[in-house]
Every structure is written in structure tokens, then in C-alpha cells.
Image: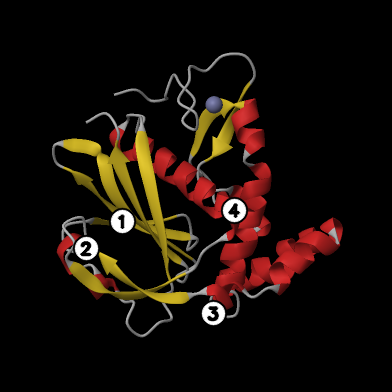
């Protein structure tokens, strides 16, 4: 088993030229005064790391906004680092947050690959794929962490499930959830579980829950088959 990937875990091209270490779970999701030791980092191209930095800030604003006043850690980050960041950035991003993300939530049915109805949940369409790009990066990093392989050429499908909806409990996915691994990570910022397809591990399903509130379901489908 390799301790480190020899390719960038974000773009999967060989590491060469300017490289740096990237926090798989973005460090700005943590309270800077209580930053846990041993956060998961992996080597990346500097350009890949830099290319996601604004998306990660946007991601933090969305995630923390959804969890603030329901989760103590998220509330602290919302009142502190997020507000300071918004004050610095001025009108454009303040306007972006003024539109309440939760108002965009809509009730949708979920189905598995065979078309079987799994239940209702709420889905939010996030802006411009930015949240999705960060979630995909996190899944890529966690896949390396657990499998010691880069996930390779996969398609991602990402859904948001609002856990405040009465009918969006984990029971929505009974067949899959029972077989998944449950993992807690990183001081209350992220809880996640996943399941790999037996004959094609890079086809997988991931549940990511930030600050015990915003929850995402991410499917990866191997394109090599
Ligand atoms: Zn790269």
C-alpha cells in the first residue's frame, strides 16, 4: 500500500512542477482556534489547490449557513470567520448569501439505479456546481484514504438532502445504509459513510453530513466499464 499518491488526487495527473498539500476536508470548515491535529492532507498541484480555493470558500458559506443556529460549531464559524470574510469581500458575496439557500429546496423523490422508489427528501440546487466540485474533491480524497487508490475516471451524481425534513431520515435508503460503513471524522465537522460496489470499487455511494445538518448523497460511477 502506498502511503502517498504519486499523482495529484484532484486531477489525477502525475505530480510534477509546483506541488503543495491540500486539506481533503477544507480547513476553513474548522474553528481556526481549535484546528484538530492530523487533518487529512494529500499532495496536489499548486494550480489544482489554488483553482478550488474560491469554491471552498463558497462551499463553507453554504454549508455553515445551513447549519448555523442548529449546530454550535457551525454557529461559531458563521459568526466569526464567515462574517469577517464577507465583510472583506463586500457586496457581491453578501448578496449571494442574502438569497436564502433553503428557500430553493424542493421536495423530490429518490430512486435507486433499478428505479425502485426509496423515499422523499428535499433537494437544493446549489449555484454553478461549486459545491459539487468541493464535494467531489472530498470524495476523491476519502477514497484514497480508505482504498489507497485514486478513484480514476468516474462520473459523480450529487444530491442534497435536508435533514430537517421530517421524511428525510436515514431510513430513506434502507437497503444501502444497512451495508455501509459509518465513520465519524474531524471533530464534529464531517460525519460520513460509504459503500463500494463489490466488483468495481470506484463505483460507490457516499453520505456526507456536515455539522450534523447539511447532508449529501454522492454516487460515483466508474466510466471504464
Ligand atoms: Zn492536479
Q: In front here: 104 or 214?
A: 104
In what element is the residue under mark 1?
A: strand
Q: Which residue is mark 2?
A: 177
Q: CA distance from mark 1 to mark 2?
A: 9 Å
Identify the disc placed on residue 70. 3
Earlier along the polypeptide chain: callout 3 or callout 1?
3
Contact flag, marks 1 and 2 (Cβ < 8 Å)? yes
Residue 152: % across, % down? 35, 30
Earlier along the polypeptide chain: callout 4 or callout 1?
4
The answer to whether mark 3 is within 8 Å of ligand 1 is: no
Q: Which residue is mark 1?
A: 193
Q: CA distance from mark 3 to mark 2?
A: 24 Å
Q: CA distance from mark 4 to mark 1?
A: 26 Å
Q: Quadrant of ligand 1?
A: top right
Contact flag, marks 3 and 2 (Cβ < 8 Å)? no
Identify the disc placed on residue 128. 4
In what element is the residue under mark 3?
A: loop
Q: CA distance from mark 3 to mark 4?
A: 26 Å
**Residue 64 seen from this side:** yes
Q: State which mark lies toward you, 2 or 4.
A: 4
Q: Residue at x 50, y 51 (%)?
A: 132
Amino acid at each position: 500500500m502506498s502511503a502517498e499518491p504519486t499523482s495529484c488526487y484532484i486531477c489525477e495527473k502525475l505530480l510534477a512542477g509546483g506541488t503543495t498539500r491540500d486539506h481533503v476536508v477544507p480547513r476553513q470548515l474548522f474553528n481556526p482556534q481549535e484546528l484538530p491535529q492530523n487533518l487529512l492532507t494529500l499532495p496536489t498541484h499548486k494550480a489544482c489547490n489554488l483553482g478550488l480555493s474560491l469554491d471552498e470558500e463558497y462551499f463553507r458559506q453554504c454549508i455553515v449557513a445551513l447549519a448555523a443556529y442548529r449546530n454550535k460549531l457551525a454557529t461559531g464559524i458563521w459568526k466569526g470567520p464567515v462574517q469577517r470574510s464577507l465583510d472583506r469581500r463586500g457586496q457581491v458575496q453578501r448578496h449571494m448569501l442574502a438569497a436564502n439557500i433553503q428557500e430553493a429546496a424542493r421536495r423530490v423523490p429518490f430512486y435507486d439505479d433499478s428505479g425502485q422508489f426509496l423515499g422523499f427528501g428535499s433537494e437544493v440546487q446549489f449555484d454553478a456546481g461549486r459545491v459539487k466540485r468541493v464535494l467531489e474533491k472530498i470524495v476523491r480524497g476519502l477514497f484514497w484514504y480508505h482504498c489507497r487508490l485514486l478513484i480514476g475516471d468516474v462520473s459523480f451524481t450529487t444530491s442534497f438532502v435536508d435533514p430537517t425534513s421530517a421524511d428525510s431520515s436515514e431510513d430513506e435508503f434502507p437497503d444501502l445504509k444497512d451495508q455501509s460503513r459509518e465513520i465519524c471524522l474531524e471533530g464534529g465537522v464531517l460525519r460520513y459513510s460509504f459503500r463500494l460496489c463489490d466488483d468495481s470499487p470506484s463505483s460507490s455511494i457516499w453520505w456526507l453530513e456536515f455539522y450534523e445538518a447539511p447532508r449529501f448523497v454522492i454516487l460515483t460511477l466508474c466510466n471504464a466499464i
